[in-house]
Image (tube, rainbow, N blue to C red):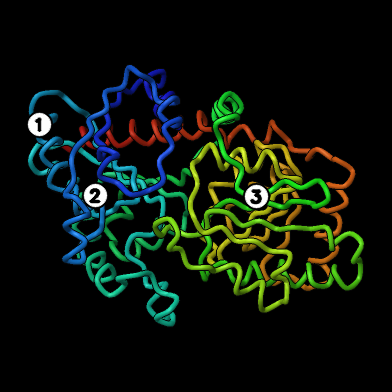
Amino acid sequence: MSLPYFEELGWQAEVITVDQKFTDVVKDELLLNTVPTSIPIHRVKALSKKYTAKVGLGSLALRSLWFIRKKGNELLKTKKFDLIYFSTTEFPVCILGTYWKKKFGIPYVIDMQDPWHTDYYKDKPKAERPKKYWFSYRLNKYLEPLAMKAVDGLIAVSANYIETLEQRYPRLKNKLSAVITFGAFEVDFEIATEYNEQLNLVYKAEKKQVNLVYVGRGGHDLKPALQTLFSAFKKGLKEDPQRFEKISMHFIGTSYAPKGKGEFTVKPVASDFGLTNYVSEYTDRIGFYESIKNLQNADGLMIVGSNQADYTASKLYPYILAKKPLLAVLHSGSSATKILKDCNAGYYIGIGSEEEFAFKTLSNYLEGIKNNLIPATDWEAFKPYTAKAMSEKQVKLFNEVMGFHFLNL
């Protein structure tokens, strides 16, 4: 979403990425339509997971690290670059920043889209921890300090991420940083509309039902938000059955696991409330533009957020751009809550809200759907959250890092 704007903002970009045939994530070829053709894309190899999985090594970062290093060395030896920017959640790759800075004297910036090394799961039951947690926890604890050792600037989707890193590595307090989330990219909706016929709808949009849709990850940290939502819904079934009996809630793409192997994390909570007839969970991930189609065909949209305040819910922007009635159940301290309120983009229930308040808010939201109300979003207030505005913030930090770097040479 930044690449279309970098050049007009004074920066020419080249990209190193892993060739898609070495990845096992859901692929969406249409995403390439948004990348300017003038930008060189260097696709590198990775060790085949077919073989590395036999020794328990599935991480794309570790499988591709040597190849990215090789390509980076080749580019940095033959061309002049001013800055290296790591924007990936395959965090182990970021240790190359220290290596390249020492070898070529080029400053680097790391974009923390998620926490890298975290103690969040340390006190959680084994069943709630990610697979291979023991190994990844220790690996991240070792690699993160290597990457932060010489970093020149930090970008993060949450201020809490930066504060945690500064506490862990005090030298970072003297480094440049900025909180920059993903931006809203309206072009995506134009592409989804253009290719609508070849995109799939996960759920059946039956006219007798009121289809409420959530597209995004699940996880045990969403349980408090789901409990708040389902408690209000159960009360609705009791007090206003004529309205609530028609509701069908669809949670789509809730697991990062390979197709057909995802763990249900929404259905068990629905079962606790006796709502299995009203809640469907599709664990398989879907393509980005398919997710937009599923949002556009819904009667209403839902977002449930983590019980952690630093959860940013970057997927909030497509929900707002879909211009459908929107209900969000989020932590009161989440940046997504602030964005939703600033833009008047939807109905809000705080995690852990009293059941009566949650029920009334849910009822008002459903009334809006019934009356075909378009959200009264303040689009002027929304402008700072667009992809272009976020790209301008990125470039501002790049320029500051460059100036600071040369000042200290």
Name the one closer to the observer, 163 or 349: 349
| Circle 2: element type | helix
Q: Is residue 203 left or right of residue 260?
A: right
At x 38%, y 46%, the residue is: 155
**Observer-nearest residue: 249 or 206?**
206
| Residue under pointer 1 | 74
The residue at which mark 3 appears reads as 203
> Looking at the image, which is closer to me, 267 or 231?
267
Can you give x and y, in whole percent of width and height, for residue 183 in the image?
Answer: 52, 37
Q: CA distance from mark 1 to mark 3?
A: 48 Å
Q: How far apart are the two marked residues, 2 and 1, measured between alpha carbons?
A: 17 Å
Mark 2 or mark 1, which is nearer to you? Answer: 1
The part of the image, by quadrant, that contains residue 195 is top right
**Residue at image point 72% right, 71% down:** 275
Q: Is residue 48 above or below residue 28?
A: below
Q: Would you say 401 lies left or right of 114 here?
A: left
* Label 2, residues with CA under 10 Å away: few <14, some 14-19, many ≥20: many
Along the horizontal axis of the image, is 390 left or right of 117? Answer: right
